[in-house]
Image (cartoon, rainbow, N blue to C red):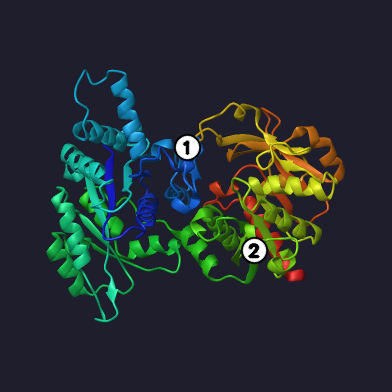
Amino acid sequence: MTKYIFVTGGVTSSLGKGIISASLAKLLQSRGYRVTIQKFDPYINIDPGTLNPYEHGECYVTEDGAETDLDLGHYERFLNTPTSQSNNITTGRIYQNVINREREGAFLGKTVQVVPHITDEIKRNFKILGENGEYDIVITEIGGTVGDIESLPFVEAVRQFRWEVGSSNSLVIHLTLVPFLAAAGELKTKPTQHSVKMLLEYGIQPDILVCRTEHHLTADLRKKIALFCNVNINAVIESIDAPSIYDVPLLMLKEQLDKTVLTKLKLPNKNEPDLESWKDFLGRLKNPTAEVRVGLVGKYVELPDAYKSIVEAFVHAGAKNECKVKVSYIHSEQLTPENAVEKLRGLHGVLVAPGFGQRGFEGKIEAIRYVRENNIPFFGICLGMQCAVVEFGRHVLHLEAANSVEMDGHTTYPVISMMEDQKNVTNKGGTMRLGAYPCDLKKGSKAAAIYGKLHISERHRHRYEFNNDYLKDYEAAGMIPSGINPQNGLVEIVELKNHPFFVGSQFHPELKSTVADPHPLFVNFVAASLAYARKN
């Protein structure tokens, strides 16, 4: 039978439930167990696809085209296994499913209520991944904080679920904060006690407490927490602030979190964890032999979580190249023809980030013009690639009014146009081109050399595309469409012939970069930036 682990959070949000879940999953996976993680989010949006990145950070897209929470990115980066629509469920999805069934008459005239109808639907979703026979353990992260009104149905569903499957088939890990009060000069356990007391009021006794802290927990503190919170002392786990999220699996190994979990779930300690490749990655990450400065040009740079997967892809690619990638965030709205040189000076490479809408578009164009004309390595993703096409059209092909129809619906030269299948779409949510699509690479191109193969698959999230009416003009001038979708002729990759590294991709390569398998486009972009740094 599949075993279920629930991870809840107390005291405050942003304690790192996603990282703890991913780290535990990594440890269990390294012992030979088949593990997956799912995230239940308490907001009423059906998915985060329509949320502003300032609200929720980046929107992470899975292979099957689900727009999901950025924590799923952590799950994939740590475990190196793909997630799907079933790995991220929101309150909105739960209610939508129940209301649709009510409209169909599925409840036979019953009054539809939170208990049992909503909680039954939540429990059904708890089980989806466990019932397909692919996993030994399913870790379920409950978003929000215990005590939030929005989280209550999820917490109640966990209580019912545990009662139904039995205590040895499920457990609850509660993540809390043990703050350090500088005035008193000591760590305080009261917030943790209150948080556990609240969980007990809802009928759930946590099995393991993971305590986020800035200072080490003493044996006395652990005893006190164990005593007041009804847990074994070996189930009080310290989660001290770490220099990198990739240190957390080893810190949890030292705290024997995985052993405690296996004991409570009555599972055998199959093998000792095999973390050699993880340690090798950490060794290269922490001992770089060089450093490069890369500019990330975007309009959401005040919140680095808006570009989480890109930043982590740089971490993976940097470790692969044994160099530290220092990311400089550059606000595209503040870039003008007058200040572009000054703002981009000293960078060894520039990545122009994805995004939507007019704001900051012209600043991205200026950044691309500067790096193209000065032979600085450039990497454009999604809108970044489209900006490169517009910039090239304006300044090389002399189509002065070249633009994307997203920015100007009446442009004389619509070098970026709306995809045919998007023209009649009126709903915003979940209607873009989403998920994995195939791409054929041109023999002899830089893209083919980077990937080392001619057929690839990458993930998408866009409505607009390169306008193939201009394809011949662009090729003749030196911008090569080196990646093409075999089904519809969509240009997936553009590159410049006579440039050290100038690549734009319509897809999002950052979504497939993991610790075990850094993305080749990022690895090569960092290598090109490193070569540029050494020359200059």
Q: Residue furthest front?
A: 410
Q: Left or right: 354 with respect to 472?
A: left
The amino acid type found where label 1 is placed reads Ala
Horizontal and vertical percent position of residue 434: 55, 36
Q: Residue at x 85, y 46 (%)?
A: 398
Q: Secondary structure at mark 1?
A: loop
Q: What residue sits right under mark 2 in the picture?
A: 294
- Quarter of the image for residue 90 reads top left
Q: Residue at x 72, y 36 (%)?
A: 410
Look at the image and tell me in which quarter the N terminus lies: top left
Label pair 2/1, CB-CB below 8 angstroms: no
User: Can residue 124 be seen at all in this image of the molecule?
Assistant: yes
The amino acid type found where label 2 is placed reads Val
Whole-Å distance between the Cαs marked 2 and 1? 30 Å
Q: Residues within 10 Å of mark 2 (few under 14, many from 20)?
A: many
Q: What residue sits right under mark 1 in the picture?
A: 66
Instruction: Using the image, tell me which numbered label, if any, was put on residue 45.
Output: none
With respect to residue 501, does 408 lie above or below? above
User: Can residue 446 be seen at all in this image of the molecule?
Assistant: no
Horizontal and vertical percent position of residue 239: 32, 65
Q: Which of these two is toward me, 514 or 204? A: 204
Q: Which of these two is toward me, 53 or 141? A: 53
Q: Residues within 10 Å of mark 1 (few under 14, many from 20)?
A: many
User: Which of disc 1 and disc 2 is earlier in sequence?
Assistant: 1
- Quarter of the image for residue 195 reads bottom left
Horizontal and vertical percent position of residue 199: 18, 53
Q: Left or right: 367 with respect to 328?
A: right
With respect to residue 446, does 486 lie above or below? above
Q: Residue at x 87, y 41 (%)?
A: 476
Look at the image and tell me in which quarter the C terminus lies: bottom right
